[in-house]
Image (cartoon, rainbow, N blue to C red):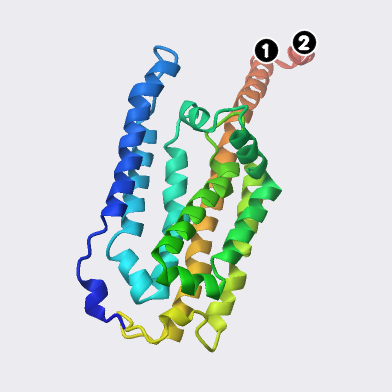
Amino acid sequence: MPGPASVTAWTPHPDVWLLVVVFAVGYWMAVERVGRRVVTPGTPVVTRAQVVAWSLGCVALWLSSDWPVHDVAEGSMYSVHMVQHLMITLLVVPLFLLGTPAWLARWVLAPGSRRFAVVRACSRFLPAVIVFNVMLALTHIPALVNASAENGLLHFGVHAALFLTAFVVWMPVLSPLPEIPRLSWLMRMVYLFLQSIIPTVPASFMTMGDAPLYKHYVGLTNLWGLSTLEDMQIAGLIMKIGAGMFTWALIATIFFRWAADEERRQRPQVRRALERELEQIAAGPGSTAAVRDA
């Protein structure tokens, strides 16, 4: 039975380090060897904001997969396991998408290929909602959670599936490709609203349950002295409130950006109308009709 020392003592995870290095170095090599070849001369291959976003994505991937998060998540607390999954789906993947220039996405997906067709089909409103729901349901099945926590290969497979499907879920909002267009401002808010409601179902089962759902965590020494049931209830609250607040903050951000965009588009019309009014005032009452006709 793992004790506190077994999860708090530093444990190296070279596989995680290698994965992060692959993402970081792979991005740099793609920019240097592919980007400079396919991007029109004089056009930036990648922006500073994209480099920062990709770098932060690599940091978030490392933090969510390495010690201590990984060890505590698998050997002590399901609530930390929940934080780990949310970091992958709400931080790592969106940051990677924000850091991906269009040419890189086009190079990876290869428009016209079968994988491009699959990604484009799954990235529409309804399919993306379905993909999210299916993955959400699968990753909370007690049998799968218990088995993946005790089998390293299965655990990696679950995280890989979570990572890949998260790209599909975020494409309608953050797609870097014109060939797979983002939803309109309004539909993005509706889409995220729906995605924020669905997780409340399993979260409610965990928060209001009177017995632990996942037997793997029963009997493990909790790092902070919580019971297994209390730990599961906290996990439910993290999923319901934490993820919900993040999604609603994103909805609010989209709303204000949409409002600012609408204001910018209407500003020239307002300015022209104001100029006409000023011309009428300056010309006097007798020339009102002439100015109006003009």
Q: Residue at x 23, y 72 (%)?
A: 8
Name which residue type carries label 2.
Ala
Give the labeled residue for mark 1.
283
The image shows residue 60, relative to residue 142, as above or below, that is above
Q: Nearer the viewer, residue 272 or 24?
A: 24
Q: Residue at x 67, y 45 (%)?
A: 187
Quarter of the image holding residue 273?
A: top right
SS label for mark 1: helix
Mark closer to the observer (1, 2): 2
Q: Residues within 10 Å of mark 2 (few under 14, many from 20)?
A: few
Name which residue type carries label 1.
Ala
User: Marks 1 and 2: CB-CB under 8 Å?
Assistant: yes
The image shows residue 226, relative to residue 22, as above or below, that is below
- The answer to whether residue 206 is seen in the rendering is yes
Residue 82 place in picture, x, y as percent:
44, 67
Give the labeled residue for mark 2.
290
